[in-house]
């Protein structure tokens, strides 16, 4: 080892516990960037004068960044290392936050959302693979527990902080992103000092969505589970503030943020409290809970009841947590060492598609036929999807 490399290693290596905390913080802060907008959508809608369907598309367009990141760069950290790719993802997140900070029209919001999706797509796969390697000699399920719980924690804190700033601080469309930029900068400094775990390998940027042939059958169950879980989360992140304002006549941005924060905290707590629950049981339980959860969503709108909304939010958090945690855990167990980030990225593609694509359909139906009709369609779709996924799970998840 040269003197330069020795100094580099000495500079960058935290101890094991600090490295775990830092990578978990990176996952949390990146995902927070996707929900700081949740309480602000109504403000942007009023400020820029766009329709409900445009709002839905602003939410969903970030899947373009997700898919670009995961298809083209999903396995890059397997080749060049976790740390440089993580820092690149943080840099893109900073660019996204700056565009949000200066946004003056719908186009700038779309560009910022695409960049945010790109940063999350690259950072999520890299961070999850990094955690799996940091706990390589421990219980492998620990990596999935850390990744999924901090994911939801970041989503919740981002929404809550943004809602509070929107209600109680000046210039919410500016101050929110100033605070977020500070958080990104602090975590980036910590990532710069976190040790590398990946071994160098040949580098290729050719788009590839691939799961090794020998694990494709068992991969189906976690993939469909992740899609369904994130469809529920996407529904809340994109449309819950509008439901609160229009059907429940609750216009507080802090309440909108708090509702999503409830979902995220319940999800994080569920992941930690069910750590001993088997992967298969977690996935199947999550899929089973999706059906009554969507029925409660419709009931909350028809009854115009905030208490029912609070109950359904908790149910949604439990269902999403079990489905997402169980899916990611089995993927981490299945993935070969030299293709871990690639396989994890394939799982995240399923999740991000579930998070965005159903929401687009709901936004269109909501514009044409009303919010309750859209929620009924969403409930029917999730119910049918859950039944199909339960069939896959019972057949393959063993």
Image: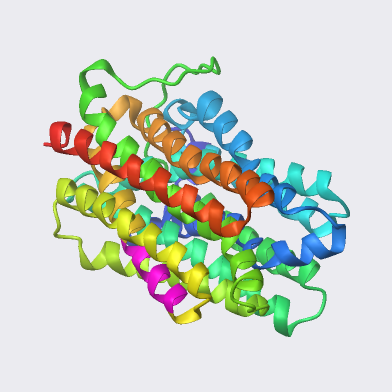
Judge whether residue 32 can be spotted in this image: no
Lateral position of residue 376 relative to residue 32, left or right: left
The magenta stretch is 308-318
Residue at the farthest bottom position: 168
> Which image quadrant for residue 356?
top right
Lateral position of residue 87 relative to residue 109, left or right: left
Lateral position of residue 144 relative to residue 300, left or right: left
* Residue nearest the observer in this picture, 125 or 321: 321
Report the residue at 50% width, 69% height from top.
302
Coordinates of residue 50 in the picture (x, y in percent): 81, 53
Of helix, strand and loop, which mostly describes the magenta segment? helix
Report the residue at 78% width, 60% height from top.
45
* Residue nearest the observer in this picture, 28 or 260: 260
Report the residue at 68% width, 78% height from top.
251
Coordinates of residue 320 in the picture (x, y in percent): 36, 56
Coordinates of residue 275 in the picture (x, y in percent): 20, 60
The quarter of the image holding the C terminus is top left
- Display coloring: rainbow
298 up-or-down from 111: above or below: below
Residue 313 shown in magenta: yes
161 up-or-down from 117: above or below: below
């Amino acid at each position: 080892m040269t003197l330069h490399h020795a100094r580099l290693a000495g500079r960058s290596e935290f101890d094991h516990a600090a490295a775990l905390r830092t990578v978990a913080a990176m996952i949390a802060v990146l995902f927070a960037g996707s929900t700081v907008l949740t309480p602000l959508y109504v403000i942007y809608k009023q400020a820029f004068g766009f329709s409900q369907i445009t709002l839905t598309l602003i939410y969903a367009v970030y899947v373009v960044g997700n898919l670009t990141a995961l298809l083209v760069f999903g396995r890059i950290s397997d080749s060049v290392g976790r740390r440089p790719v993580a820092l690149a993802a943080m840099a893109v997140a900073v660019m996204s936050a700056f565009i949000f900070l200066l946004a003056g029209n719908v186009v700038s919001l779309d560009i910022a959302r695409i960049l945010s999706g790109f940063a999350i797509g690259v950072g999520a796969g890299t961070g999850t693979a990094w955690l799996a390697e940091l706990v390589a000699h421990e219980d492998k399920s620990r990596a999935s527990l850390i990744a999924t719980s901090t994911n939801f924690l970041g989503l919740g804190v981002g929404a809550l902080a943004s809602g509070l700033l929107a209600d109680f601080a000046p210039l919410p469309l500016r101050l929110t992103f100033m605070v977020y930029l500070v958080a990104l900068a602090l975590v980036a400094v910590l990532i710069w000092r976190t040790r590398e775990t990946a071994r160098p390998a040949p580098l290729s940027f050719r788009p590839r969505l691939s799961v090794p042939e020998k694990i494709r059958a068992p991969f189906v169950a976690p993939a469909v589970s992740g899609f369904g879980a994130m469809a529920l989360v996407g529904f809340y992140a994109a449309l819950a503030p509008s439901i609160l304002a229009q059907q429940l006549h609750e216009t507080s941005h802090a309440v909108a943020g708090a509702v999503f924060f409830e979902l995220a905290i319940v999800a994080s707590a569920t992941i930690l409290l069910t750590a001993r629950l088997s992967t298969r049981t977690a996935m199947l339980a999550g899929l089973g809970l999706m059906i009554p959860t969507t029925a409660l969503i419709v009931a909350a709108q028809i009854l115009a009841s905030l208490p029912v909304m609070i109950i359904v939010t908790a149910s949604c958090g439990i269902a999403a947590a079990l489905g997402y945690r169980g899916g990611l855990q089995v993927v981490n167990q299945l993935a070969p060492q030299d293709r871990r980030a690639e396989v994890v990225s394939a799982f995240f593609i399923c999740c991000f598609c579930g998070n965005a694509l159903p929401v687009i359909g709901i936004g269109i139906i909501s514009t044409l036929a009303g919010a309750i009709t859209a929620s009924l369609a969403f409930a029917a779709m999730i119910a049918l999807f859950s039944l199909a996924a339960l069939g896959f799970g019972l057949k393959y998840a063993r």
